Image (cartoon, rainbow, N blue to C red):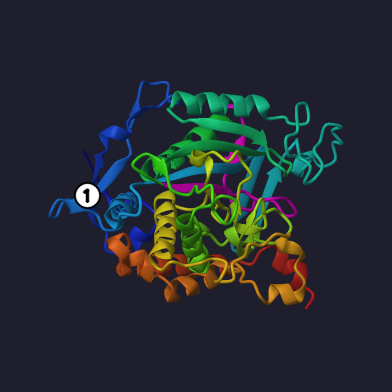
Amino acid sequence: MLPFPLKDFTGIAVLIHPCDLLAVPDIQSAVVDNISKTPTLVFHCNLIDPEGNVSYWLDPRAVAKRAEKYLIETGIADTAFFGLEIEFFLFDSVKWKIGEGFSYHNIASAEGGIGEFEDIGDKYKIRPQEGYLKMPPFDQFKEIRDEMVKKLKETEFMIERDTHERATAGSAEIDIKYQPLLKMADQMLLFKYLIRNVAASYHKMATFMPKPLRGHNGNGMHLHHSLWKEGKPLFYDPEGSYYQLSKLAMQYLGGILTHAKSLSAITSPSVNSYKRLVPGFEAPTTIAFGYRNRSTCIRIPAYPDKPEAKRIEFRIPDPSTNPYLCFAAIMLAGIDGVKRRIDPVKAGFGPLEKNGYDLVQKEKEKIQFIPGSLDRALNELEKDHAYLLEGGVFTKEFLELWITHKRNEIKKINQYPDAVDFEFYFDC
């Protein structure tokens, strides 16, 4: 048990009066830190308010635990599984600085020929948008990813694959096999810690920032999701009307799509997130579902028709999200769809069988789209959040504080002129 002052941390909690909390280790979450040279045991902790010895109301991990409890109480399922495709970049160096009369950032990547490597003319440079599944010597980071996967497996991760992603400049993806909600949220935090430290050991910088490079794909966190009950998968039905998806699965994805606009304020919670969510870079923008369709919010993967493999892929989230809040919110949206028996076809969410980026105007008028900015997403969350309050998983006060915190973040960012402002307006 570790007492600590809340004021020393960032996030929504600092908006209220400072107080002392207790970090109580969850013994079941213990793993050996294989980065530290000193033998170290790592725990995920629950935040406890010493006044009353109760769970701290702003603890995101407590939100995830309440979500798992609520799922069981509904009787719909007893386990929500989440598998992740986590994308990140490995750069040779990244520098940035903000001052009263200046702001700049400079990214250097030998693999992408960016920054100080721009004029070198390396014959093994990967051309923009041609990085997917590249092999060495074009893929200059395979050895680093191999070490990352080794460290992850040593720390009880089940890794399904790793690959160079479509963007250049060290774009990478590592996929984690599905785990229950709380377990996967814990693993997401540990994943970032391990990736950053392995990268640093090779004198590289890892970033999970959603859109660090203009003109390249960004970093997503595609989320593979299914419900199970008593050890049986609930999303599979051999007689299912759409690619063997059960009626429950269709209603569940209908709930997620119904609340997709407000969900984005939690699953894509940074200003930078919405620079990723634009057409043309395999990022979803259409609020729809479709088989093998990467332009839709929900993609139905084309995998063997095994009951345990039947799932949905929600493509909106990115690694800037808080995984405890993200997974809980998505599950609550899906449960709402089941409770309300939402038919996604009748609701106009698809299926969309063509590229959402190529829709003509008449087709666009029939489809909803993800908010174009964090500010708009927060507006949607203000209007649509009742589903998040079910089971006491989130509270109204928590969401109000989240919105206030994010609006303050937007305000701070908007106060700084950057190079693009000068490019467009210096000669006005």
Q: Residue at x 51, y 36 (%)?
A: 176
Q: Which residues are magenta?
A: 201-227
Residue density around tag 1, few if under 14, some if 14–19, many if 20 or more, within 10 Å:
many
220 left or right, relative to 267:
right
For image coordinates 44% across by 64% down, the residue present is 337
Q: Is residue 303 visible?
A: yes
Q: Is 92 left or right of 46, judged from the image as shown?
A: right
Question: Where on the picture, by quarter, is residue 7?
Answer: bottom left
Tell me if 208 is positioned left or right of 135 in this view: left
Q: Which residue is mark 1?
A: 48
The question of residue 205 being in magenta is answered with yes
Image coordinates of residue 351 in percent, x first then y, are 63, 62
At which x and y percent is residue 94?
64, 43
Tell me the element at label 1.
Answer: strand
**Observer-nearest of 237 and 251:** 237
Q: Quadrant of residue 120?
A: top right
| Quarter of the image with the C terminus in it | bottom right
Between 391 and 201, the residue placed more toward the observer is 391
Q: What residue do we see at 56% from left, 32% from top?
A: 160
Residue 285, above or below 41: below
